[in-house]
Image (tube, coloured by chain):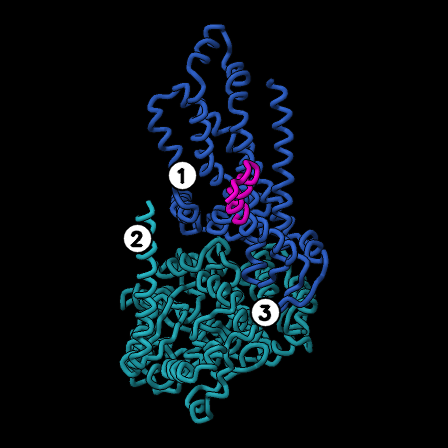
Chain colours: A cyan, B blue
Amino acid sequence: MKKIALFALVLVLSMSFATAAGTKEAAKDGKVILTAYMQIDPANDQYAGHNAVMAAFAEKYPNIQLDIEYASGEAFHQKFQSMAASKKIPDVFTCYGGARTAYVTETGLALDISPYIDDAFKAQFASATWLPQGSAGVLYMIPPSFAVCHSIYANTAILNKLGLRYPETFEELVAQIPTIRAAGYYPMSMGNKDPWVVNSWLLGTFIERFGGREWILKAAKGEASFTDEPFVKALEVIQAMSKEGLFSPGVNQMSNTEADQEFYQQKSVYLIDAAWRTSAMDSQLPEAQRKAIDMRVFPALPGEKYHNTSSATASEGFGIAKAVEKDQAKLDAALAFIKFYAGEEGASIRAQFGEVPSYNLDLNKFSVDVMQGKFVEFSATYPMGYVFDSIMDGEGVNLLNTDIQAMMMGSGNPKDIAAKYEAWVAKNDSNRD
Amino acid sequence: MPRLNKRSSYFVLLLPAFIIYLAIIIFPIFMSLGLSFTEWRRFRMTGFIGLQNYADILSDPVFHRSLWNNIQIMLISVLGQIPLGILLAYLLHRKWVKGTKFFEFMIFLPITISSVVIALLWNRVFSPVGIYTTFVRMITSNPDYVVKIFESEKYAMLPVLVVLLWQHTSLYMVIFLANLQRIPNSVFEAAVIDGAKESTIITKIVLPALSPVIFTCSVLAISGSLKSFDLVYAMTAGGPVNYTYVMALYLYQHTFTFHNYGKGSAVSIIIVILSVGLISLVRGIYAKAQKKFE
């Protein structure tokens, strides 16, 4: 028994030494090793561009080794929060400009990279790339692209068959309902089972149409109230959409994926979704069907002040741990990586996979799939407004979302919801601190 | 080296287990208790606020609904799963149906499937694009048909309860079946020869013999009900609106989504208090019942 225990101990120790020796060997090679934690699923087609960038980076910088751990969805955040709580975060990590990864950006664990980004580099990007991030208004990451959260996909084949065209106004859209229903189609697919959908994909755009960017920033700070017209009117449009029967039956029971499938199966004429759905359409739909899909924004609302707007927010990028600043070699390597990824080389590679980068590129020289091409055109055509839930605190937004969901099911009215939300924001939202 | 006396030896031998128990059970509970009196803003503890978190939680209508939904789950567990488990176990034990092995397997099957998979399966059937909904739309020629119960404030919890009953009854059935097999067959035979009715056999032989197991199962059912999370999260995520919210979801959201660790800890303490209180109540009832059977 003693011999077995001794053998096991020796085995464990020798394995530990072997592993430790391996790390030292790599360091002796002159390589700088960066640990990385990325909210990416490299096996998913959507991230083919990311994989290509990583391969190009490894080729250009053989002296920098990224030891990457990948995770996606909520699992990413749960583990990252645990890392943040223990104050041990990787050197490079996925990071959001808003509150989503505030557990690292608001707790002093992420590096403010603005001193390391010069004006010449900044000038090569769309100006919205450099909007201040976090409550301190600094820069934690370079957004490689923009997440466009509002788009209406229209099946023009069905529209043509029914003798209809894409509506210019909300009234025109409502007037199409009887024709569409009589032909056996549903007007609009949207999956609001998770109630953030209506907020992210409609509400922000509607508020922007009625009040503009200035109004939401004022309301967030308390210089305007959520009981004001732009907010109440935006809620009224959502209520009207439900009452008029624009959505497919069971919109609040339907998941996002199910809504997409309903549209893909050509059971509905329009789909409300984010613009990043184009990559899934390119991989799942036949070419003829993709060619018949138009990407548009919501028709003009009665009384809107700003027209044809969509909504977008800076996408997540890669941040650097504050602790890395103490090691110059590591800091240089990390900065090289994030600049390569978001800069010209990374942007050119990602553009080949249909991404619209924040870096200023002539996208016409890239050959992309059908829907990705439409996304490029969409991004160039429509002005982008804000995404409501990237500005306001999550808890209040969640309260608002459930009230909107209840309203869509026939309970509650816009004025009461607005008053309840304003009361919550006034008391709790960090924008009013 | 002097030999330890018997009492000291017990302490020494128990010490490692006691340290582990302190570290993973007692310490987190006291840590949660401490955190439950604190306020958190922007991911930082901003101060001590006494019982404010508890006051906020106990006056929050979403928490009231969550608590009521947990009570419903507890009722379906204690008054549904356990009696049904006893009944099924008894039917199979007395071999009143043919193919008992087949039924044992079929009834036990749901508990072996992950809750997430079960939730996905049920959603696939009853969602607006699910098989059942599509079929009803087809035969009724009503393209607007959806299962309305999912949107009902009063009854949205019902599908979750049905799935819980279906999924967990099997576990109790297996436990009761194993314990029934410990009662010698001669006892049943003697009772039948003596002319005892089936109801008498159940109340005078089966239930007294199973009472310790019923107590254990009740404790499991109560504690399991109060921390229900996986199935509800995967099936409805608490929606629509907050109709199917449960306390564990409320805790999860405040802790991990809104990063309000103080409020989340207060919910966990409330769950602990409810669990201990209810289990003590069941223990009292069990003690009384035991006296009665004696």
Location of mark 1 (residue): B110
Q: Residue furthest bottom?
A: A120
Q: Nearer the viewer, residue B95 or A272?
A: B95
At x 50%, y 65%, the residue is: A81
What amino acid type should be assigned to the residue bearing mark 1? Pro
| Marks 3 and 1 close (CB-CB < 8 Å) | no
Q: If the image is split into quadrants, where does the N terminus of chain A sit?
A: top left
- How far across and down, in percent of the image, does residue A152 sit? 44, 69
Q: Residues within 10 Å of mark 1 (few under 14, many from 20)?
A: some
Magenta span includes B13: yes
Q: Regarding mark 2 in the picture, which secondary structure is present there? A: helix
What amino acid type should be assigned to the residue bearing mark 3? Ala
Q: Residues within 10 Å of mark 2 (few under 14, many from 20)?
A: few
The disc label shown at residue A7, or none: 2
The chain containing the residue under callout 3 comes to: A
Q: Quadrant of residue B90?
A: top left
- How far across and down, in percent of the image, does residue A403 sit? 60, 59
Task: Please tell me if label 2 and label 1 are on a single chain.
Answer: no
Mark positioned earlier in the residue sequence (2 or 3): 2
Gap between marks 2 and 1, in whole Å? 44 Å
- How far across and down, in percent of the image, does residue A206 sit? 55, 72
For discs 2 and 1, the disc positioned in front in the rendered view = 2
Q: Residue furthest front?
A: B1
At x 47%, y 29%, the residue is: B85
Q: Does residue A329 lie above or below B140 as drawn? A: below
Q: Does residue B202 lie above or below B139 as drawn? A: above
Magenta span covers which residues? B1-20
For discs 2 and 3, the disc positioned in front in the rendered view = 2
Q: Residues within 10 Å of mark 3 (few under 14, many from 20)?
A: many
The disc label shown at residue A234, or none: 3
Q: Nearer the viewer, residue A86 or A351?
A: A86
**Majority secondary structure of magenta residues:** helix
